[in-house]
Image (tube, grey):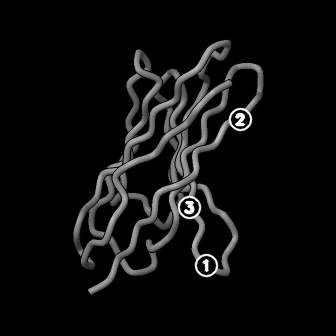
């Protein structure tokens, strides 16, 4: 069983910064990629950023230049540094872990609220 736990959400003013963290633990999996998704009320889940085991990254157009994803392979952990936050970034942010077998695992999410 693989467990995925996110942390770091909270309330921040527009223009502020937050750092989200995610760690995966468990037996029997070998991680290929980790990523962050978000889901705002009434909207579909969207991928924010993803990073592969080799360090390749991909970002949603809406966050390019503001968000940075990084990972620690040894700890099966990933972080998302979010700068210049906007009210439209408000959402529940969820961490996804994908293993080499194609299985994916999800955390329960952490709420980010950008408001003055």
* Numbered badge on residue 73: none
Instruction: Please report the residue visible at 34 percent of the width from the left and 52 percent of the height from the top.
Output: 8
Q: Which residue is mark 2?
A: 104
Image quadrant in which you'd find residue 50: top right
Query: Which x, y percent locates residue 86?
Result: 36, 76
Image quadrant in which you'd find residue 42: bottom right
Position of residue 42 relative to residue 4, above or below, is: below
Question: Badge 1: few (under 14), some or many (20 or more) residues near its Cα, within 10 Å?
Answer: few
Q: Nearer the viewer, mark 3 or mark 1?
A: 1
Q: Residue furthest right?
A: 102
Instruction: Please report the residue visible at 53 percent of the width from the left and 49 percent of the height from the top.
Output: 36
Instruction: Please report the residue visible at 51 percent of the width from the left and 35 percent of the height from the top.
Output: 51
Q: CA distance from mark 2 to mark 1?
A: 23 Å
Relative to 50, 84 lies left or right: left
Q: CA distance from mark 3 to mark 1?
A: 10 Å
Secondary structure at badge 1 equals loop
Q: Nearer the viewer, residue 59 or 41?
A: 41
Q: Which residue is mark 1?
A: 41
Query: Which x, y percent locates residue 95?
Result: 54, 45
Instruction: Please report the residue visible at 47 percent of the width from the left and 24 percent of the height from the top.
Output: 76
Question: Badge 3: few (under 14), some or many (20 or more) residues near its Cα, within 10 Å?
Answer: many
Image quadrant in which you'd find residue 45: bottom right
Query: Which x, y percent locates residue 30?
Result: 62, 16
Mark 3 vs 2, N-terminal side? 3
Q: Which residue is mark 3?
A: 38
Q: CA distance from mark 3 to mark 2?
A: 16 Å
Relative to 99, 36 lies left or right: left
Relative to 77, 18 lies left or right: left
């Amino acid at each position: 069983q693989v467990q995925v736990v996110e942390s770091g959400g909270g309330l921040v003013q527009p223009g502020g910064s937050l750092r989200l963290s995610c760690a995966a633990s468990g037996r029997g999996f070998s991680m290929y990629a980790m990523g962050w998704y978000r889901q705002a009320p009434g909207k579909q889940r969207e991928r924010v950023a993803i990073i592969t085991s080799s360090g390749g990254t991909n970002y949603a157009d809406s966050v390019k230049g503001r968000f940075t994803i990084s990972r620690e392979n040894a700890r099966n952990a990933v972080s998302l540094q979010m700068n210049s936050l906007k009210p439209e970034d408000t959402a529940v942010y969820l961490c996804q872990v994908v293993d080499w077998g194609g299985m994916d695992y999800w955390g329960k999410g952490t709420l980010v609220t950008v408001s003055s």
